[in-house]
């Protein structure tokens, strides 16, 4: 099992991700599931709860607040007891660092109610919880698990975290095995998930049950109406209809918040209507309101930070970021919500060939990006040393390219490889105070000379 890795000089190399098929190690005898013994409950987006005998396993809990700064909001209204379920879970798995899977607003509730809840993550090159200390969320039982090794929970339940084949530096996937009921073949091909159409995967895998998770978000804020209207998404219903057409024997499930799949019933008789239980007809499925101000006020709080009164923050920040020796010039323009330059916002150039900050584009041939970034999000990202996913995936910027080329090295660095420790802005302000003090003393001397 190999994947392609991009090298610093623009070259490629093949990388062995893991020993092939590690899930085949230490096979167990398959046992028959009883009715009600294994249930999958969908909560929202990529969050589901697995009931496995007496254990409850929670995946990727995004239950509160936005993701990617203010770009994504939950489409579905989670069940009323979703946070209670999270806080009562025996195990919690978080697949990767993106905020629609690693939700600090959600984990803040967990930390207040049950800080020692057992959380499991993969041993990715960028730690999943790299931002934990700065977030001030207090969690005391985070377990970093090596890839490709069975983690035994009890005599019937074990799980294995695997490196993702598309984003091995940050993403993971998981096999959960209870009485040997979960087919390893699903994960084997899921690692190539972005290289094939999902319908073709189903034809290859011939699964008995298929359910699309994640993707249940909406660009809910009024200022993002353009994105909401143009970012057309494939629906779970359409995907399942296609699968039903090419694989009539596969049971498909379009989940609604609180709906439950009884795996024992579904495997023994897919035609059994009791295998899937949907929420009552009166249940609110879709969210109708979001706490916009609560989360946008936090972003806006960065605008007035002292650091942005000094132009030198630009050099300090990009030096901290550490990206250079690449023939790319970017122009960053701070804007309002409509992507119009604000009069008190910064507008600057960065030349990453030598990490300089010119007043105009250099005469040499070079790649060029113009980034119009929403003021509050850009400054929040800078102030807290956040990854640029909040800007890029969160639709918080508009990008022009000359020529129209995607620069993997640049985006990969700012989305995955920034330092895990935020910029030392206290040191920066001390340097500014010291520099300003020197300038003041020089100006005083000049004034005295003029007077004399």
Image: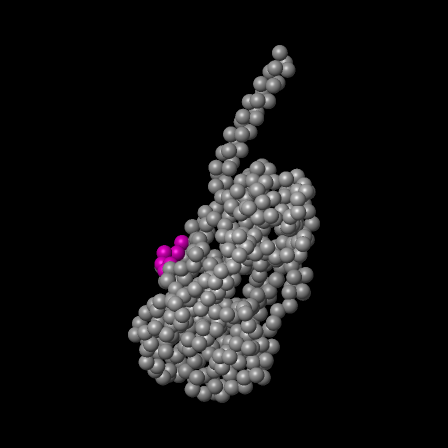
Q: Residue at x 37, y 74 (%)?
A: 24
Q: Residue at x 42, y 50 (%)?
A: 133
Give the image location of residue 413, x and y in percent: 53, 52
Task: Name the main secondary structure of what is drawn in magenta.
Answer: loop
Give the image location of residue 398, x and y in percent: 65, 54
Residue 379 in view in this figure: no
Residues in magenta, as a range: 138-143
Near-viewer residue (49 or 183): 183
Give the image location of residue 268, x and y in percent: 42, 86
Q: Quadrant of residue 364?
A: top right
Q: Quadrant of the N terminus?
A: bottom left
- On screen, residue 392 versus residue 13, left or right, reads right
Q: Hey, which residue is sitting farthest left in the picture?
A: 155
- The image's colouring method is one colour
- On screen, residue 427 versus residue 301, left or right, reads left
Q: Residue at x 33, y 76 (%)?
A: 27
In the rendered image, residue 43 lying in the magenta stretch gets the answer no
- On screen, residue 158 versus residue 288, left or right, reads left
Where is 425 relative to 180, above or below? Answer: above
Q: Quadrant of the C terminus?
A: top right
Give the image location of residue 105, x and y in percent: 49, 57
């Amino acid at each position: 099992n190999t994947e392609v890795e991009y090298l610093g000089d623009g070259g490629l190399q093949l990388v062995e991700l893991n020993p092939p098929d590690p899930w085949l190690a230490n096979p167990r005898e398959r046992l028959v599931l009883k009715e009600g013994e294994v249930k999958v409950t969908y909560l929202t987006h990529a969050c589901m709860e697995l009931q496995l005998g007496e254990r409850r396993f929670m995946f990727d809990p995004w239950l509160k607040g936005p993701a990617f700064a203010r770009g994504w909001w939950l489409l579905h209204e989670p069940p009323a007891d979703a946070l209670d379920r999270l806080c009562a879970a025996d195990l919690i798995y978080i697949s990767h660092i993106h905020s629609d899977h690693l939700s600090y607003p959600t984990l803040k509730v967990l930390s207040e109610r049950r800080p020692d809840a057992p959380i499991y993550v993969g041993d990715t090159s960028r730690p999943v919880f790299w931002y934990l200390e700065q977030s001030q969320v207090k969690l005391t039982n985070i377990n970093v698990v090596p890839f490709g090794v069975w983690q035994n929970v009890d005599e019937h339940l074990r799980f294995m975290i695997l490196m993702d084949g598309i984003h091995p530096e940050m993403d993971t996937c998981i096999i959960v095995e209870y009485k040997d009921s979960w087919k390893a073949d699903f994960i084997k091909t899921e690692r190539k998930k972005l290289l094939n159409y999902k319908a073709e995967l189903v034809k290859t895998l011939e699964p008995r049950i298929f359910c699309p998770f994640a993707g249940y978000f909406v660009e809910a804020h009024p200022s993002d109406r353009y994105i909401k209207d143009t970012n057309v998404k494939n629906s779970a219903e359409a995907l399942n209809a296609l699968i039903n057409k090419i694989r009539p024997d596969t049971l498909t499930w379009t989940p609604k918040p609180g709906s439950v799949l009884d795996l024992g019933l579904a495997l023994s008789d897919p035609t059994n209507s009791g295998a899937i239980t949907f929420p009552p007809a009166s249940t609110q499925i879709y969210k109708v309101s979001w706490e916009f101000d609560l989360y946008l006020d936090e972003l806006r709080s960065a605008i007035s930070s002292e650091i942005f009164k000094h132009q030198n923050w630009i050099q300090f920040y990009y030096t901290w970021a550490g990206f250079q020796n690449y023939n790319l010039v970017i122009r960053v323009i701070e804007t309002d919500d409509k992507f119009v330059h604000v009069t008190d916002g910064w507008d600057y150039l960065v030349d990453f060939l030598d990490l300089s900050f010119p007043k105009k584009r250099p005469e040499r041939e070079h790649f060029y990006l113009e980034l119009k970034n929403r003021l509050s999000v850009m400054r929040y990202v800078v102030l807290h040393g956040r990854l640029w996913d909040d800007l890029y995936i969160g639709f918080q910027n508009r990008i022009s390219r000359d020529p129209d080329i995607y620069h993997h090295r640049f985006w990969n660095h700012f989305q995955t490889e920034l330092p895990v420790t935020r910029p030392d802005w206290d040191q920066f302000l001390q340097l500014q105070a010291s520099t300003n003090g020197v300038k003041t003393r020089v100006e005083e001397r000049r004034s005295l000379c003029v007077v004399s």
